[in-house]
Image (cartoon, grey):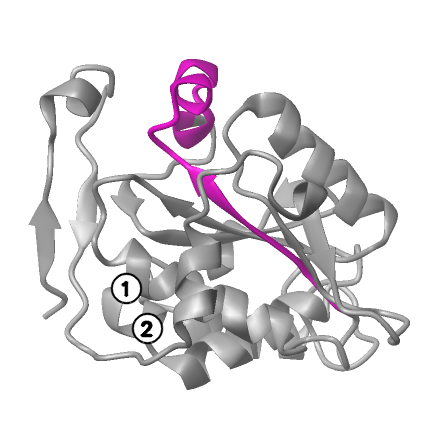
Amino acid sequence: MNPIIALRPPAVSARLSTPLTVTAVFKSVRLPQAAANAAFSTSGVARQGQTQRAGTKSSNTVFASVRDLDQFHTYQLLSSSSRRPLLTLWTTSYCPTCRVVAPLMQNLVESGVGEEEGGVGFCTVEYDAPDVMSAGLGMTYMIHSIPTLLGFDAQEAQVQTKVTDGRKLADRHFLEEWIRTEARRHGGRGGGGGRGGRGGGPVASRWTSFFGGSR
């Protein structure tokens, strides 16, 4: 059973059409303190919006947290133009599990996971940021639990591989495979495929099966 904690702070729940659930994680993850602090920087222009590993053709990019619709669309356009999927982690200020998952994901992306497969962009989306809530981003992409991992390829949400299971979100090996799978899309949408693969087919079916039950 995947235990969850229902959290509905008055300042937030009053503005949501449906209550969010916050997934509880029971697996310890150790990360450098610097990575944990960077993931929850309150600066809207941290790293001038992004950091990128130098010296590789298809390097990964970590963007600053999304706090409004323009930011979100900008990151989508940048990722789409470079044919690299955008990986988003939806968080809230009152989510304790997010403080485990966000730095873990950032650490993996910054360490180069997925670069051999074509590279990815990564950002957190602050679900309870006023401008994000007023734009209805969470409703648009059916974000009903926090944290949620959702990939975008060519600006399209890849809902088949959306992850909300708390244990999977805290599993380093699972996240590494998830990042690599998303990186293989290369603007081809579909199911992630093998090296150089596009769209659906047997490989896509394999990964749909692998991620089955992650919601």
Is residue 162 visible from the viewing direction of this image?
no
Q: Are marks 2 and 1 in contact (CB under 8 Å)?
A: yes
- Residue 76 is situated, as x and y percent measured from the top left of the image, at 70, 39
Q: Is residue 183 magenta?
A: no
Calculate the distance from the C-alpha at mark 2 to the C-alpha at mark 1: 5 Å
Residue of label 1: 165
Q: Is residue 129 magenta?
A: yes
Q: Amino acid at mark 2?
A: Lys
Is residue 168 visible from the viewing direction of this image?
yes
Residue 134 in the figure: left or right of residue 117 = left
The residues colored magenta run 119-139
Q: Secondary structure at mark 2?
A: helix
- Residue 183 is situated, as x and y percent measured from the top left of the image, at 69, 68
Q: Amino acid at mark 1?
A: Asp
* Total numbered labels: 2
Q: Quadrant of residue 138?
A: top left
- Residue 103 is situated, as x and y percent measured from the top left of the image, at 43, 64
Residue of label 2: 168
